[in-house]
Amino acid sequence: MKKIAVITGASSGMGRRFAETVQEWGQLDEVWAIARRADRLEELKATVPFPVKGISLDLTDRKSFDIYAALLQEEQPQVALLINASGFGKFCAAMDAPLEVNLNMVDLNCLALMALCQLTVPYMTEGGRIINIASVAADQPIPYINVYAATKSFVLRYSRALNRELKGRGIGVTAVCPFWTKTEFFDRAINSDEPPVVKKYVAMYQPEQIVSRAWRDAKQGKEISRYGFTARAQSLLTKIVPHSLVMDVWMNQQDLK
């Protein structure tokens, strides 16, 4: 039986970094790299330490779930690792974003992640691990990054509960909650034709830092991975301070009305 890792969002950012360092999890026969851009997936073959099966799918299209399920059924692999790194955000008022954009954000950040987990778990055995990319944004409501923060709140809570549900099967789930991280995320999140929503970034990390910490935390069986003092401090404060005040601080910090 072929032992594999499945990584979504593998064409850039944290997904790509997970793919390039996947040997951290151990020996694999193959890496299934999922993303929309087939050319980027082809490039991974030169940098990933195991054979790569590039699977070009748009996970906002529910038909993609049928294609993925059929591949699993056909190949019957042992999935040692599932990493859900696909996702995007938009920096603007929720009512100003086209409805299609907000729906796609929910589809990719929430529905696709849930579908990949549900379709993959039957092919996982004891010792398997799911790593889901959430965000520090999951800990609080964030005006003008509203829908994105709400989707990441779903990811965090879904992941934590799924970790508990799968415990008896020996499968663990880790939710990674990065702070601002320098990836292509910002290319889509920011509308260059309008004044910026986010004017002050308290800290900006690199994908390598987030992924390195995530590997360590996943191997230690932790259900949440947070890199950096700023991320951990903010998460703690949002548990103590009323969210109405947290939103006031955010609005004042970014000079939003």
Image (tube, grey):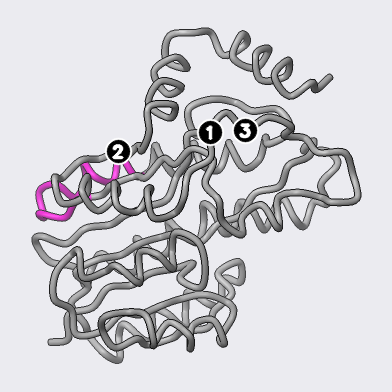
Q: Quadrant of residue 221?
A: top left
CA–CA distance in space, label 2 to label 3: 23 Å
What amino acid is at disc 2? Answer: Ile
Which disc number belongs to residue 138?
A: none
Which mark is nearer the camera, 1 or 2? 1
What amino acid is at disc 1? Answer: Ala
Residue annotated with mark 1: 203
* Residue at screen point 61% across, 55% down: 185
- State the image coordinates of residue 38 (x, y, percent, origin top left): 56, 86
What amino acid is at disc 3? Answer: Tyr
Decide which of tag 2 and tag 3 comes sooner along the chain. Answer: 3
* Residue at screen point 24% across, 45% down: 163
Which mark is nearer the camera, 2 or 3? 3
The quadrant in which the C terminus is found is: top right
Pick whichever, 216 or 103, lies toward us. Answer: 216
Residue annotated with mark 3: 201
Q: Quadrant of residue 21?
A: bottom left
CA–CA distance in space, label 1 to label 2: 20 Å
- Sort mark 1 into few (<14), some (14-19) or many (20+) by Cα contacts within 10 Å: few
Decide which of tag 1 and tag 2 comes sooner along the chain. Answer: 1
Give the overall secondary structure of the magenta segment: helix
Q: In the shown orientation, is residue 179 left or right of residue 162?
A: right
- State the image coordinates of residue 87 (x, y, percent, origin top left): 55, 57
Q: Secondary structure at mark 3?
A: loop
Q: In the shown orientation, is residue 86 left or right of residue 142?
A: left
C-beta proximity under 8 Å, tags 1 and 2? no
Which disc number belongs to residue 224?
A: 2
Q: Which residues are magenta?
A: 159-172
* Residue at screen point 45% across, 44% down: 134
CA–CA distance in space, label 1 to label 3: 5 Å
C-beta proximity under 8 Å, tags 1 and 3? yes
